[in-house]
Amino acid sequence: AEEAAEEKEEAAAEVELMQRGLEERLAAWQLEGGQLADSEAVWRQFEARTSGLSQELCEQLRLVLEATVASKLQGDYRTGKRISMRKVIPYIASGYRKDKIWLRRTKPSKRQYQVMLCIDDSESMRHTGAGGLACEALALITGALTRLEVGQLGVVSFAEVVELLHPLDKPFSAESGAHMLSRFTFAQRNTHMAALLESV
């Protein structure tokens, strides 16, 4: 029991050290001007760090976000796209009376949602140390939603101005994540919530 507790403490210390290192790297990268070439490496670190949690979130969201697009064949119809082979023998045995042997695409199996994530890009985020946490949360959520194939995913930053960082109609990738990171400054002085609500 003591060994298990020690291993748990060591793992927690290792995670905390990794977290601190990542936050320091993010802070240094932002001070250097947030070059796009470096932002991809930083984004990949965020993805690696949040991979396990992202998978867990994906499975939880799978239960919550119902499939909305009918793409699977289902049902007992008199007309349709494909014959249900399980119904053919009863159809023949019934003297061709039980003629509901056709399948149609009526079972929802795909999701088609529009999800917009809004990240505060104000100076207060940097002062409270929440900037790095916001970037990490962004990597976690986008990873989960991409795995789930949720539909369309967009990201905006807001403070003094609202900026579209990733449009809804564009597939999300590591390059998209790197581009978003390069656009965050966490240096804007004011936050205009009304402008955000009007834009979204």
Image (tube, rainbow, N blue to C red):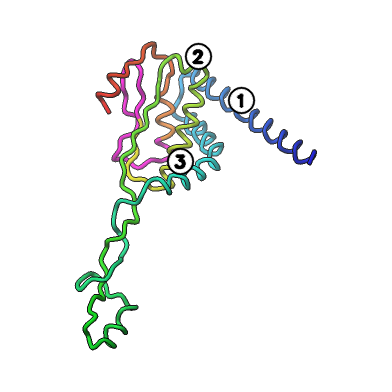
Q: Earlier in the sequence, mark 1 or mark 3?
A: 1
Look at mark 3 in the image and give the residue it sits on: 143
Q: State which quadrant residue 1 falls in.
A: top right
> Quick one: SS at disc 2?
helix
Q: Residue at coordinates 65% horizontally, 28% vertically from top-left?
A: 17
SS state under label 3: helix
Residue 196 locus on image (x, y percent): 30, 23
For this view, does 26 lie left or right of residue 186?
right
Q: CA distance from mark 3 to mark 2?
A: 27 Å
Q: Is residue 173 left or right of residue 72?
A: right
**Residue at mark 1 to residue at mark 3: CA–CA distance:** 22 Å
Specify the label residue 127 is tagged with: 2
Is residue 94 covered in magenta? no
Q: Which residues are magenta?
A: 156-176
Q: Quadrant of the C terminus?
A: top left
Q: Which residue is mark 1?
A: 20
Q: Residue at x 49, y 20 (%)?
A: 30
